[in-house]
Amino acid sequence: MRKTIQSKNGRDVLTLAIETSCDETSAAVVKNGREVLSNVISSQIDLHKKFGGVVPEVASRKHVENVNIVIQEALDTANVELKEIDQIGVTYGPGLVGALLVGVSAAKAMAYALKIPLIGVNHIEGHICANYIEDKTLVPPFLCLIVSGGHSHLVFVEDYGIYEVLGKTRDDAVGEAFDKVARAMGLGYPGGPLIDALAQKGDTKAIKFPRVYLEADSFDFSFSGIKSAVLNYLNGEKQKGNPIVVENVAAGFQQAVIEVLVYKTIEAAKRKKTDTIVLAGGVAANSGLRRMLTEEGKKQGLKVKYPSLTLCTDNAAMIGCAAYYDYLAGHAADLYLNAVPNLKLGEKYVRYSQE
Ligand code: KG4
Ligand code: ZN
């Protein structure tokens, strides 16, 4: 098992990484997988806010406008010239197909022109790898809870690039539930950070929302029920003419969600006999989740780690890290690389060409 950070042939490897899977156009230069020389993120949030969520067609167009500018800025900030880049890493799924295609096309053009390897990266794997950047000492095996706007997975990371998916959501992703509940409360988009901030001022016990654990031995999740329970509560109170204490709704909802996440994550860590849990994805920025998982983990003798806020949400540095480990494992793509909107964790790109 490979346990140390190493470069191919003992020399430094510079990766230029591109991420355009949703509403962030991002490019980064990463040295030997874990040293971030630049991580430029151009967020489209303001553009999508007025629609209450990401509009795929609008996202693709904005990526087209931004991608070259963001790539150039990443090179300039890193003080690196294109000719020094050893490989291009790009997110090719999962995500919005039109958005992914912008990054994939830019990456293919650059890899072809520069005659350097092209690596197709799985976005979820990128989120896991954000932890390798945050903590330079982190090595597999460990358990990872990935919670974002599109995904909720409990994954055992056996080694670099080797994953066992223990459970995932059967309906809404956690971030999606936060965003939908926030929308119903009239808070705006994205809802996660807004609910997080309100919840800190509310009483977690004032309103009891359901906790959905599913079957006793299952590590799957379901968040559509709690989302509906909050919407029903809001409608019911409105009909009765009662005032709604938004802080308490936010606190009650968040508590119900994180109790389930924390319980299942700790049970999964015990099942896999690992002493390390890491968080990943946009919802890993949630202050309540970070606090409760750390506290409950400590009681069980488990170490809990999570990335800084910038590395939790979508960014290209995490893609550069994943691309580096793919490169060491020999998973280079070719120019047939295409966007795969529903790409599964652990699926590797199969080359068509032999060159
Ligand atoms: O990983 P990410 O940037 O994009 C996807 O790959 O989906 O995650 C975005 C999601 C959104 O649903 C957003 O509301 C949620 O992460 N989020 C949060 C927080 N910050 C972002 N959810 C709860 N608490 C937060 N502090
Ligand atoms: Zn993401």
Image (spheres, rainbow, N blue to C red):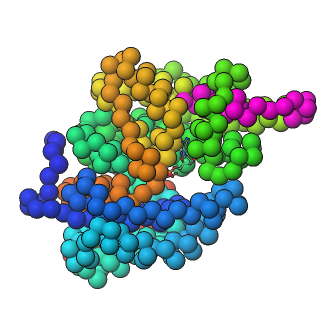
Residue at position x 25%, y 72% in the image: 80
Above-or-below relation of 33 to 87: above
Above-or-below relation of 41 to 138: below
x and y, in percent, of residue 77 in the image: 33, 68
x and y, in percent, of residue 112 in the image: 29, 80
* Left or right of 231, for residue 204: left
Residue 307 visible somewhere in the drawing: yes
* Left or right of 123, for residue 207: right
Residue at position x 36%, y 17% in the image: 300
Residue 172 visible somewhere in the drawing: no
Residue 145 quadrant: top left
Specify the segment rendered in magenta: 238-258
Which SS does the magenta portion mostly show?
Answer: helix
* Left or right of 14, for residue 302: right
* Left or right of 184, for residue 113: left
In this rendered view, identify the residue nearer to me: 177 or 163: 177
Residue 229 quadrant: top right
Residue 207 quadrant: top right
Residue at position x 49%, y 46% in the image: 282
Location of the N terminus (image quadrant): top left
In the rendered structure, does residue 198 fall within the stretch colored magenta? no
In the rendered structure, does residue 242 fall within the stretch colored magenta? yes
Residue at position x 25%, y 55% in the image: 35
Instruction: Kindly give the residue lying farthest to the top in the view shown.
Output: 299
x and y, in percent, of residue 256 in the image: 61, 27
Location of the C terminus (image quadrant): bottom left
x and y, in percent, of residue 108 in the image: 35, 75
